[in-house]
Image (cartoon, coloured by chain):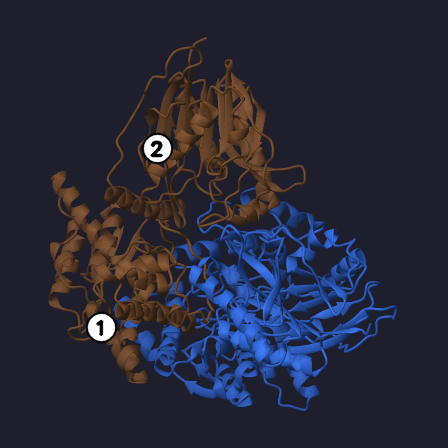
Chain colours: A brown, B blue
Amino acid sequence: MTDLRIAMAQINTCVGDIPGNAALVRERSRAAAERGARLVVFPEMTTTGYPIEDLALRASFQRAAERAVHAIAADLVTDGLGDLTVVLGTLGTNADGRPTNEAVVLRGGEVVSRYAKHHLPNYGVFDERRIFAPGEDPCVLTVDGARIGVVVCEDIWQDGGPVAAMAGEALDVLLVLNGSPFEEGKGIVRTELARKRAAEVGAPLVYVNMWGGQDDLVFDGHSFIVAADGAWMANAPGFEDALVTWDVPTGDGAPVQSEVVDFASDDEQVYRAVVTGLRDYVVKNGFQSIVLGVSGGIDSALTAAIAADAIGGENVVGVSMPSEFSSEHSKDDAADLCKRLGADYRVQPIAPLVDAFQAQLALTGVAEENLQARVRGVVLMAISNRENHLVIAPGNKSELATGYATIYDAGSIGGFAPLKDLDKTRVWDLARWRNAQARLLGEVEPIPVNSIEKPPSAELRPGQTDQDSLPDYALLDEVLDAYVEHAEGREELLARGFDEAVVEKVLSLVDRAEWKRRQYPLGPKVTALAFGRDRRLPVTSRWRERAE
Amino acid sequence: MTDLRIAMAQINTCVGDIPGNAALVRERSRAAAERGARLVVFPEMTTTGYPIEDLALRASFQRAAERAVHAIAADLVTDGLGDLTVVLGTLGTNADGRPTNEAVVLRGGEVVSRYAKHHLPNYGVFDERRIFAPGEDPCVLTVDGARIGVVVCEDIWQDGGPVAAMAGEALDVLLVLNGSPFEEGKGIVRTELARKRAAEVGAPLVYVNMWGGQDDLVFDGHSFIVAADGAWMANAPGFEDALVTWDVPTGDGAPVQSEVVDFASDDEQVYRAVVTGLRDYVVKNGFQSIVLGVSGGIDSALTAAIAADAIGGENVVGVSMPSEFSSEHSKDDAADLCKRLGADYRVQPIAPLVDAFQAQLALTGVAEENLQARVRGVVLMAISNRENHLVIAPGNKSELATGYATIYDAGSIGGFAPLKDLDKTRVWDLARWRNAQARLLGEVEPIPVNSIEKPPSAELRPGQTDQDSLPDYALLDEVLDAYVEHAEGREELLARGFDEAVVEKVLSLVDRAEWKRRQYPLGPKVTALAFGRDRRLPVTSRWRERAE
């Protein structure tokens, strides 16, 4: 018996684009067959994209997904690929008519096997128990005499279940279809888990993951294969299309390594995740260009650089909106940034606009500061309205958490907020990484050094700096990470050794920010990258850690 | 053996306000004991409020809830109520340390029994599998020789489970602690279900529900008791505090009816739900006053009337922001409205503000219309900023679904949108109902008849009316209800007999509205009433019913 060549098709599907996703399957199947593969494996929910949320409950969508599966099977035969076994993910329904998250196996123009995911994740960013019914049956198929097990994503993250049940099945290989979102440091967790499951079934494990941005998630790809003994057999790079083949040993031969690539550094992975998230939001929604406010500060500078990397600097419009409190260096740095990026640079002074409101309203203090900030928001919306750009918001995680931002200003309006899940410390790190990367490649550094080095300021009153109102960012970010990201209470924060005055300050800032979002709106539904945990908290809540 | 007097304490808890909720328990327990009750039953999650979302996962919050339970038990003894049995809901943890949705039984200063909810709803507005571990044990206690079963909310909505398991337990009464949100027509569903479960266990069923607004939900109360044979024994009114007592027959005596009140009409229930939702958003978040734009149109008129009913007309600020396209009758109707409500009426003409932007941006068409609308938003935010009012948004469900609104205008900014879940047809119905109610009570009609009768218009260009862009509202609302609320596809809509051109028009409006929300932000997270189903859809999606 010769070895069985399989292909991992790491693709970027789009939610709801059933014809587009089906076309990807057809094209990648042809490419896999040309490279001698007998079996090709696609990621979770291939036909529909992932995650589809309550679209799963729409009968018309269920029908469309099922029609697509049969059309793909027929098209493969038309393409002369009737002998190829194709494993892909789709939306199915069970005997009770409830939606299921399925893997289907196509061969010879037919659906030869179906498997419904057993373990439905319902934590963090996942809500699968809301929309899917769990499957109960295992799936083992035979291709060219090799015994092949199939499971989907969460099935390998839970002990027991379908993988444990296949331990006695004498499998030659276990296929896992995934829609696994990017999180920093998740690569090693996934591979260790895969090694454990490969040992459990005594067979190589093929982990095929999707990549691309979908709303507030980014999927990284990084598909891989480990042998039964855990040896690294093959892997795909992150954040791009890949088709990786590997020969499953079906006789007594030892497994042989095929394509292997290095993992990028953490900073590079995060940067590429952010670029991917923004690019796919633009492309999948059919936008062509982006507009944002450029203040000369680090947040808008990094955001503009990310936008230029995502869709090209020539498709980015940077609008400088100086007020009477804007320093000369701010205007210079903003102009310099746009020049480096090849972006369209425009200037719209806001003094006449603010004066018109002030003639009627005579605001003072914070209300006056917020007015300046919101007038900028209206200017961006108007330019976007006139020229059809997507507005993006440069607000970062530290300022959103502490409320150090005006709701509806140029930093918070927009359809997508690339930095929303990056704290300020990370914003500086990524800016430095991106410039270093440019130097390495002999390219122009995209971000003016001055924007990185100068003390951060909102410039809404003379001489203002962020540290007038906030603790030093390095310390602030550490406390926020513990309090917001890891849900630690006041007691735990003090036990870690944080200074009591700093803890009080940060908790009161976060409480106040939450309250502001109740009085004024929660701000736009800025779409952001969920690297960390996804927390869902009540809006109206009197719970205060400080009072515990 | 004498009959056992029990009390249903229908209260309005606040999420996170553990001391406040505990004080309510103490006060209502005293009142129940004064009325001769031996047992008092509170709603689901009494100590913490409901729903608490991911607060359940915060260890500090779990500790605080548990401390509160023991403090309440001790306080009851201090109050001389050591003999009273108190059943209330709280956040517990199981043997694995995972959060549970519990009923606890207090007597003599101790927690004498605990029950963890078995069935965790995870559909519509519920996400309980995300945060709670299910319980597995039943709970039957004895009070004055009577056998009493305890379950929580969803436990009675699923066949089988803890209720079925208690069928052989010879119960004298079954207590159900609920956090059941208001939906139109739900009252009859609840009572029929309760009758079925009462028959199943062969004992009366005591259904205690919370009332009040919590973010995008409104709980209606409407607590009730049915006998084993389904007879109506007692009930509480909707949308208010109530303490209803009833004597559980423990010997051979027949059950005797106690307090019974009529249900209000559907229009009255919906109106009271909307008022409750807004009032609790204001009160629970600590606001004192509300500001909104008043255009003379029906949406802002009804919204202002609701605001006045919620917190008093003297705490409402109505801002008229006429443009060059505003008709005289619009200004008159807005002034008349505020006079009827006793609201603070202000006029801020927007022409000078629009002119200042136009001098720099020279917008035309829709961009110019949107600019006018957004300038109004900035004016409201500024007034709110200066005077600390909550901004509310008068946008209705029909216009939000079809995108017949400017994102960030005076109709869509704000912390709360009272009409967000009411279609336009219902807006008119409720306005007429509210005026009729005033006539019935001999009070001033709050809403100018002209605002109800005139053709709706955004007045963003000369002679504009809504029906230039939209189908007649009666038809539009019918199609939207089928398409959006009931998730029907194009095929189903046509099969119902809707005209194909109308279906195409509505689907394309909704698609376009979804796209607009991608280019510009999704708008504020307006908090609204979920009377209907809660749908969660992907933002980025290429699914189009029209192409099915």
Q: Quadrant of residue B80?
A: bottom right
Residue A83, compared with residue B381, is above or below; it is above
Residue B497, compared with residue A97, is above or below; it is below
Residue A63 image position (x, y, % from top left): 60, 39
Q: Quadrant of residue B12?
A: bottom right
Residue at 56%, 89% in the rendered image: B340
Residue A362 image position (x, y, % from top left): 29, 84
Residue at 44%, 71% in the rendered image: B414
Residue at 79%, 55% in the rendered image: B200
Is any part of residue B454 visible from this angle?
A: no
The residue tagged 2 is A241
Q: Earlier in the sequence, mark 1 or mark 2?
A: 2
Is any part of residue A432 visible from this angle?
A: yes
Residue B307, compared with residue A218, is above or below; it is below
**Circle 2 Cα neighbour tier, 10 Å, few/some/many (<14 / 14–19 / ≥20):** some
Residue B177 image position (x, y, % from top left): 65, 65
Instruction: Say what amino acid the circle numbered 1 marks.
Output: Leu
Q: Residues under labels 1 and 2: Cα distance? A: 45 Å
Q: Nearer the viewer, residue A477 or B392?
A: A477
**Quadrant occupied by the C terminus of chain A:** bottom left
Check the residue under mark 2 and report the chain it is in: A
Q: Is residue A149 left or right of residue B36?
A: left
Instruction: Say what amino acid the circle numbered 2 marks.
Output: Asp
